[in-house]
Each structure stands twice: as C-alpha cells, then as structure tokens.
Image (cartoon, helix red, strand yellow):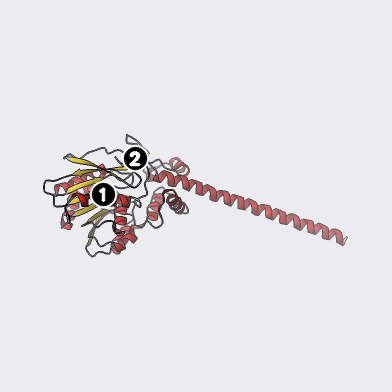
Amino acid sequence: MNTLIFYLTTQKMRLKRNKTKKTIRRLAYLLGSGVLALNAIAFMQAYSFTHFRKTDALVVKAKPEKMSLLAKIKTIFLGISVYQYPNLAKPPVNFQTILLENSQGNLLEAWHLKKSKPKGCFLTFHGYNGRKSNVLPEALAFYEMGYDVLMVDLSAHGGSEGHRCTLGFHEAHEVKLFFDWAEHYYERGFPIHIFAPSMGAAAVMRATSERMIQPRTLILECPFARLEDALQNRFALMGLPPFPFVQLLLFWGGVQNNFKGFAHQPAAYAKEIEVPLLLFYGAKDQRVRADEIQLIFENWKGNKKRQYTFAEAAHESYLLKNPEKWLSEVSDFLP
C-alpha cells in the first residue's frame, strides 16, 4: 500500500512539474513573440519616418494630435507615409540655382539671392519634411536687410535628391558642404550667418559643435534638445505611451541609417559652441518643450546669446506670426 501511495504521489508531482514547464514555455513563447512583434513594428516605423516618398503634389495629412483613433492604430502598425514636397514658391527677386553633390552622390539644390553690395550672407535651412520655400519669408527679410541669401534644400527635401532623412545628424555634413561653398565664393573674412528652424537648427548645431563650420552668428528657432525628446513629444501628441517605442525607434533608425540616434543631442552640442546665438521659441509649441529650449540656452558655451519667446506662437514661422517683434529682435542682434 505504501508503495502504491508513493508511486501515485510521484506521478502527481511529475505531472505538476510538466504542467509548470509547459506554462513557462508558453509564457516564454508569448514574451518572445511580443518582443519580436514590437521590434518589427519599430523597424517599420523607423524606416517610414526616415525614408521619404517623392510626390509632385501637396499631400494633405492630418497632424498627429488630430488623427482619429483608427488612423493612430494604422500608423502604429504600418508607420507613417512621409512625402518629399516640391517647393511651391520661388523668390520674387533674381536668384541663381546652385547644385552641389553630397557624399552619397545626390545633388542638393539651393537658391542664391544676391545683392549688389551685400554686407554678409545668410545660409538658411528648413525643418523636418520641409523645403527651402518654407523659410522664404525669413530669407526675403534678410535680403531686405542687405544680405545675400543662400537657401538650401537638405537631401530628401524640396528640390534635392535622395530619400533618406536622419533628423539633422548626417545633414550636418550638408550644412558644411554649403558653408564651404559660401566661404569659397566670397572673399576671405566675408561674414557668413545662418538661420535655421527645428531639424535644420539641430543639423547646424551639430556642424558647428563638431568644428565643421564657424559662422559669424546663428539665429535658431525651436530646436529639440535630444532626438529622443522629439520622438517622445510626437507620441505624446498622439496620446500614445512613448516607452518602449521611442527607444526602439532610435535603435532601429540608427541601424538603418548608420547614425547614433541616442547621441543626437543639440543640448549637448550647445556646450561646445561659442558662436553668438539668437534663440527663438513659441510658447504654444507642442513639438518642442520650453525646458528643452532653456537647457540649450543654459548650455550654450558662448557669452553672447539672446533668447526670446513668442507668447502666441506654436511650431511655426515666428516672422509670420509676429513680424514686428521678429524683425526688431533680429535687427538688434545682428552686428
């Protein structure tokens, strides 16, 4: 009898262990499948976010904060469709089209607006998914102030070739490409200034921090402090939890495009830049937080720096929002 009881007890324990092992295996399978699914989604998201589609027309898409629930779900699983928009306006003054080849062999397009006796030259760059015609109001303002202007389309934007965007990381080398062109075009010591918003500002800051360029002054608008912050803000606009998608997006975006997403930090670049700075921000900006702007300003190594916040502006052209104040601040800042 004791032998029978021992046998039955042993079998019962063995069945229990087998059941526990099966449960652990199932949980491990589910966990592994979930991790693979998350990475697959992040991989597609990163690719769609950094690779643009060509189009000859303006494709109207809802902003993240105005997407329907269905559109948000579709975006999560399929990624976003980002289009390379053409320039819809040209300068109303005489200009020359400049084409330069980047390291990938893509031709980048710029417009060169020239005065008869310029007191300097402004290079202008645009934001993510923008084009040089977006900053035409600012370019014309600099032109009226007496400056030549070189308006640049970064790769995969406007009239430039290419399909890949790295949110200002590799674009820093394209900033250098046009800065070098301007230095060779003008006489030695000719004042070269730069204006750039958002992603363009991040590219300019990286180029300046890495000692690729040395402009006379920088006028920057709403740069993100870290690429990670920019992505987190975008997820917040969509009402979606940023973790772990943001971290996975940064990882896979870096792998796909050969750049260090986690290290792309304009707030860190600021610690190495001594160029005089005028930093603009819009208090109603939902894509860049006020504390990011403050961190960049506080980190700026140079002593000559000014910061102004447009109380009624969002992530937009501050010149168009408040032309009188923008022109006043710029005129007071420039030498």
Q: Is residue 10 above or below residue 37?
A: below
Q: Is residue 318 visible?
A: no
Q: Is residue 271 above or below residue 112?
A: below
Q: Label 2 sits on what residue type? A: Gln
Of 134 and 6, nearer the camera is: 134
Residue 27 in picture, x, y percent from top left:
62, 52
Q: Residue furthest top?
A: 56
Q: Of discs 2 and 1, which sits in the foreground?
A: 1
Count all numbered tags in the image, as a single digit.
Answer: 2
Of 221 and 199, nearer the camera is: 199
- What residue lies at 47% left-to-right and 47% top-to-bottom? 43
- What residue lies at 30% left-to-right and 49% top-to-bottom? 174
* Image quadrant occupied by the N terminus: bottom right
Compute the Cα span from label 2 to label 1. Answer: 21 Å
- Dot 1: within a 10 Å radius of its alpha carbon, few (fewer than 14), some, or many (20 or more) residues? many
- Dot 2: within a 10 Å radius of its alpha carbon, few (fewer than 14), some, or many (20 or more) residues? many
Residue under label 1, please give it: 178
Q: At numbered mark 1, what does the secondary structure look like: helix, strand or loop?
A: helix
